[in-house]
């Protein structure tokens, strides 16, 4: 008898074809994510599920799924949407896809950094709105990357990949990461600083690559923005709530910081009439850090293989709670 599997969004076919060959597959086909109630209803009786960061994986989810559920495979690197204590109590393995999206997300972080520094959004608007009348020495002057200092908050896989790119473009890199599980950025010459305050005071650019935890929620807020260099550029490809949105709006309006490049926001999605959207010095993308064809295919394949490994009684390398594997189900 084949395993029952639910996939909470339409993911690339590269992953779905792996699952179709081995499971009784149910895929949510709606454009919008399932509501918590719909998610709980569809996961009932399933042996495994592939879920996204937009899904709430909590005690109610595990209760609705029932004792058959063995694995939730995340099509994501982050897992702040999962109640890990509830997963342990339910004896459910949680896996993710951290390696597949590293390079694409680091590329987008660098893109946002450069685009915000060089006022790309303002330039596009200038042309589109018919304001481009002539070349001028004082028009749309931005910030240099070369010779500047990039401060990275969170030296995980993506932070390390960004550091390598920044060094190649002539930037100095400092980082702050209280975690013992930081990822050394290869041969890139970087400097670890002891405190967040020191990083903010030294950096011309600040890029967030930390997970969302109680400690990192609003790690960028009014008080920490006040420590930044005047003219600093802020980039966030981590999670929206790492930044206090109201404090960021105020800082951008008052030119306390030069610009921001955001792939994630709080709230998310960001309403079109939100104050951030209309600010000329804020460049916002709709959470597309991993959105390349090859990356999303790799994530789909990784998520599918992680799920099947658990159903085949093998522990995937990308297991977030490996201790559950030895517990009686």
Image (cartoon, rainbow, N blue to C red):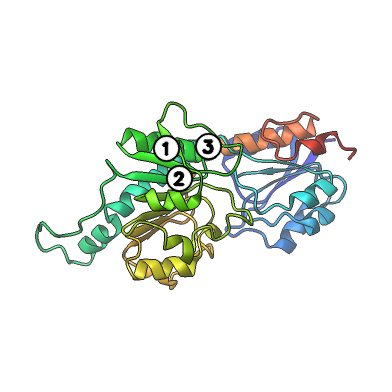
The residues tagged by marks 2 and 1 sit, at their Cα atoms, a distance apart of: 8 Å
Question: Is residue 80 visible to the viewer in this orientation of the structure?
Answer: yes
Q: What is the count of numbered marks? A: 3
For label 1, the residue is 163
For label 2, the residue is 152
Secondary element type, mark 2: strand
For label 3, the residue is 157
The label nearer to you, 2 versus 3, is 2
Q: Residue at x 58, y 55 (%)?
A: 216
Q: Which of the two residues, 230 or 279, is positioned nearer the viewer here?
A: 230
Q: Which of the two residues, 115 or 52, is positioned nearer the viewer here?
A: 115
The residues tagged by marks 3 and 1 sit, at their Cα atoms, a distance apart of: 10 Å
> How busy is the neighbourhood of tag 1: few (under 14 within 10 Å), some, or many (20 plus)?
many
Left or right, residue 294 beside residue 205: right
Image height check: is 268 above or below 182? below
Q: Dots 3 and 1: beta carbons under 8 Å?
A: no
Residue lying farthest right?
Answer: 328
């Amino acid at each position: 008898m084949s395993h029952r599997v639910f996939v909470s969004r339409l993911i690339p076919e590269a992953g779905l074809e792996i699952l179709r060959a081995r499971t009784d597959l149910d895929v949510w086909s709606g454009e919008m994510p399932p509501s918590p109630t719909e998610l709980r209803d569809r996961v009932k009786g399933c042996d495994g599920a592939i879920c996204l960061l937009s899904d709430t994986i909590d005690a109610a989810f595990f209760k609705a799924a029932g004792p058959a559920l063995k694995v939730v495979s995340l099509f994501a690197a982050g897992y702040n949407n999962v109640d890990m204590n509830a997963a342990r109590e339910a004896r459910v393995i949680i896996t993710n896809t951290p390696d597949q999206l590293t390079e694409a997300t680091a590329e987008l972080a660098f893109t946002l950094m450069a685009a915000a520094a060089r006022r790309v959004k303002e330039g596009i608007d200038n042309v589109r709105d018919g304001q481009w009348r002539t070349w001028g020495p004082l028009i749309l002057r931005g910030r240099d990357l070369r010779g500047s200092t990039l401060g990275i908050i969170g030296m995980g896989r993506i932070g390390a990949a960004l550091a390598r790119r920044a060094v190649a473009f002539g930037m100095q890199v400092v980082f702050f990461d209280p975690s013992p599980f930081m990822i050394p950025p290869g041969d890139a010459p970087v400097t670890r600083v002891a405190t967040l305050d020191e990083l903010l005071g030294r950096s011309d650019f600040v890029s967030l690559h930390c997970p969302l935890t109680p400690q990192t929620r609003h790690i960028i807020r009014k008080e920490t923005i006040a420590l930044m260099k005047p003219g600093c550029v802020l980039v966030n490809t981590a999670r929206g709530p790492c930044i206090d949105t109201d404090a960021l709006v105020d800082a951008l309006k008052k030119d306390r910081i030069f610009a921001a490049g955001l792939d994630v926001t709080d709230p998310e999605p960001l309403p079109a009439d939100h104050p951030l959207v209309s600010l000329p010095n804020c460049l916002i993308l709709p959470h597309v850090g991993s959105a390349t064809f090859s990356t999303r295919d790799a994530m789909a394949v990784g998520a599918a293989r992680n799920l099947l490994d658990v159903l085949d009684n093998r522990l995937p390398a990308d297991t977030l709670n490996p201790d559950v594997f030895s517990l009686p189900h």
